[in-house]
């Protein structure tokens, strides 16, 4: 399997590219910015982009959606609760950030336990609300792509519309901390970690006090 992480845009969002070795089909997880950088990797590796999997609808994760989809024809997938948010600047927060809101529409909605197949790669959808109402993580082959749900010794902020600190903690405990400890965690921002490390060191999940900003 081909795998590459790109840090893109002024918020240092991570975009992950996965490619199937046999079919040379690829997917990306989130499309934050700098579409050209993503398209360059695809061209260099001889990969055809089939899917764009979105972890949630916030503007900093979808800024390159239009250009990438226009150039590749890739299908866009997001949890059913956020299908309309992708194109709504008041919900994806683009309006308040002075950023453009995508015109590309969602091709398919996904829900918990769905499996997305890319050649020999199966990717399971884990529904993890708390950062937003439709946040999801993606799991495959010992790799978890956690979006803005779980970070290195941190969690996604919960003070934006649809956020809830108690809910995000439950999502992490029930959906993510049940994965093997050696699962590599690749978040939407920042450095990678592992499930085992977070279970031991992530105080935001361990403690019962309210999250403050």
Image (cartoon, rainbow, N blue to C red):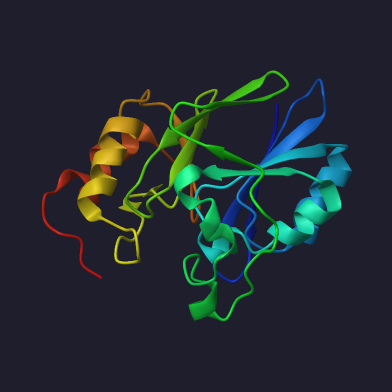
Drawn side of residue 201 relative to residue 102, left or right:
left
Q: Quadrant of the C terminus?
A: bottom left
Between 157 and 132, the one lying in front of the other is 132
Q: Report x, y in % for residue 88.
A: 55, 66
Note whether 11 is above or below 171 in the view shown. below
Note whether 117 is above or below 6 in the view shown. above
Q: Residue at x 22, y 46 (%)?
A: 205
Drawn side of residue 212 relative to residue 197, left or right:
left
> Is residue 209 something one can see in this rendering?
yes
Q: Quadrant of residue 17?
A: top right
Q: In the current view of this chain or complex, which residue is farthest to the left?
A: 208
Q: Report x, y in % for residue 111.
A: 47, 34
Q: Report x, y in % for residue 152.
A: 38, 49
Note whether 83 is above or below 194 in the view shown. below
Q: In the current view of this chain or complex, which residue is farthest to the front?
A: 84
Q: Quadrant of the N terminus?
A: top right
Between 112 and 19, the one lying in front of the other is 112
Q: Residue at x 18, y 44 (%)?
A: 206
Q: Residue at x 77, y 52 (%)?
A: 69
> Is residue 12 something one can see in this rendering?
no
Note whether 35 is above or below 128 in the view shown. below
Q: Residue at x 82, y 23 (%)?
A: 23
């Amino acid at each position: 399997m081909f795998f590459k992480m790109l840090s893109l845009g002024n918020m240092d969002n991570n975009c992950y590219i996965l490619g199937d070795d046999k079919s040379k089909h690829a997917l990306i997880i989130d499309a934050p910015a700098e579409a050209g950088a993503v398209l360059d990797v695809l061209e260099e590796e001889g990969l055809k982009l089939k899917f764009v999997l979105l972890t949630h609808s916030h503007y900093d994760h979808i800024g390159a959606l239009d250009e990438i989809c226009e150039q590749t024809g890739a299908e866009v997938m997001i949890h059913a609760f956020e299908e309309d948010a992708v194109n709504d600047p008041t919900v994806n927060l683009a309006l308040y950030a002075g950023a453009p809101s995508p015109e590309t529409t969602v091709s398919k909605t996904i829900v918990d336990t769905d499996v997305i197949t890319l050649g020999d790669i199966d990717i399971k959808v884990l529904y993890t609300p708390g950062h937003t109402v439709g946040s999801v993580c993606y799991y495959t082959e010992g790799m978890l792509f956690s979006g803005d749900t779980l970070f290195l010794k941190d969690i996604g902020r919960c003070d934006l519309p649809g956020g809830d600190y108690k809910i995000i903690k439950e999502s992490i405990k029930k959906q993510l901390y049940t994965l093997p400890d050696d699962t590599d965690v690749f978040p939407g921002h920042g450095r990678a970690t592992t499930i085992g490390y977070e279970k031991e060191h992530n105080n935001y999940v361990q403690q019962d006090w309210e999250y403050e900003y």
